[in-house]
Every structure is written in C-alpha cells, then in structure tokens.
Amino acid sequence: MNAERESTPISVEVVRTLDQLTQVYALRGIVYVGEQACPFDEEFDGNDLCGATHLLARIGREPVGAIRMRWFAGFAKLERAAVLRRYRECGVARALWEASAALAARKGYRQMLGHIEPQLLEFWQSCAGFRLREGRATFRFSDREYVEVIADLPACAEAIDLATPPLLLLRPEGAWDEPGVLDQSAARRPAERKLG
C-alpha cells in the first residue's frame, strides 16, 4: 500500500443511497463470493433490505469496507463485515466496528452479537471487546464454521427513546443531530387545501 493511502483517514457512513448500496454489494461480492467462494444466494440472503442498516468505509473516495447491522429486541447483530484484502491492515475493520457500536448505542442498544470464524476471535476480542458466548456450540453455514460472540456497549446519554423529539425521530438513520428535510418543512406555514 502506498503512503498516501496509509495517511488518508478512514470515514464510515450510513448507507442511504442506491449508489452506496451497490458499493457495499460490490465489496461483499469481492470478499465473500470471490475470495471465499460463498454461493451468491447465500451471501445475498434476503436480509439486506429488511430491517438492516449498512455502513460503508472509505479511504478517500474509495470504498474499502462494509458491514451490515440488523436490529432485534434487546440487541443489534453485526453481519457481513467485508474489507478489501489490500486494506485489512489499515484499521478499516476497527473503524467499521466503532461506527457500528456508536450507532447501536445511540439507538439504545446495550449488546452486539456477531457470528465469526473461530480464527478471527482474537482479532475481534482486541478490536471490539467481543467475548465468546458461553454454552453455545459452534455451527456451520456457507461451508464455514462459526462461533457466537457478544460485546457490551456503553450506555449513551443521547440514546433515542420515546421522549426523543418527533422531528429528530424523522431524520435519516444515524444523522439525528443534523436538521433534515422535514425540519425545514416544519418551518413552512401550512398550505390551505381546497377540497373538490
């Protein structure tokens, strides 16, 4: 890797556009379908558009990593972490983890679940504080063995809850502190509507 890539900061954004989502799919296609020979229909399993949030990591303008999060009662689940091979030693996985943990904590979650290959346990323990779930057996899918890991998330003082102002709840996922298009619309005077 060249020095310019090493010195460019990693940015992580919540995926909100189709262009960003196709970049996520490209990264996962390269890593899982290409490198790991995962069957296409097992990688793209029907969960990408149903209650999932995707995060996209970039170095400069180049998409270099992605992760999917799904939301369950009481915990968030990390899935499909994919980092391009040439960027695996640059902190991209750590940046994705930190953004995922911050997003989940802001949504009020206190635990994160992951399914990882056993040889990655030490990395995820040091990177994200994951620990092996006690009393849970290893399991297999897509021709690989996995273990369950869990990480505790710190409480977030600004966690979204029922007392959160309504316009904040209407803002785009992860951009709750930035006024959105509906904040602007709230300042308009209601239009009179003529019926019939």
Image: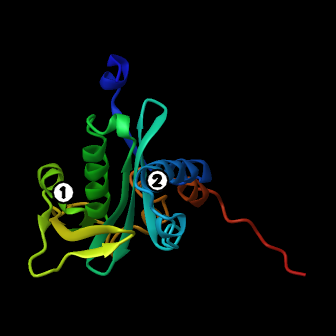
Amino acid identity at mark 1: Gln
Amino acid identity at mark 2: Arg
Can residue 80 be seen?
Answer: yes
Residue under the point 48% across and 48% down: 30
Residue under the point 18% across and 68% down: 149
User: Label 1 belongs to which residue?
Assistant: 119
Q: Quadrant of the C terminus?
A: bottom right
Q: Residues within 10 Å of mark 1 (few under 14, many from 20)?
A: few
**Within the image, what quadrant is residue 148 found in?**
bottom left
Instruction: Please tell me which of labels 1 and 2 falls first in the chain.
Output: 2
Q: Which of the two residues, 192 or 46, is positioned nearer the viewer here?
A: 46
Query: Is 103 situated left or right of 52 in this image?
Result: left
Give above or below for 194 relative to 176: below
Secondary structure beneath label 2: helix
User: Label 2 belongs to which residue?
Assistant: 28
Residue 124, image x and y in percent? 18, 54
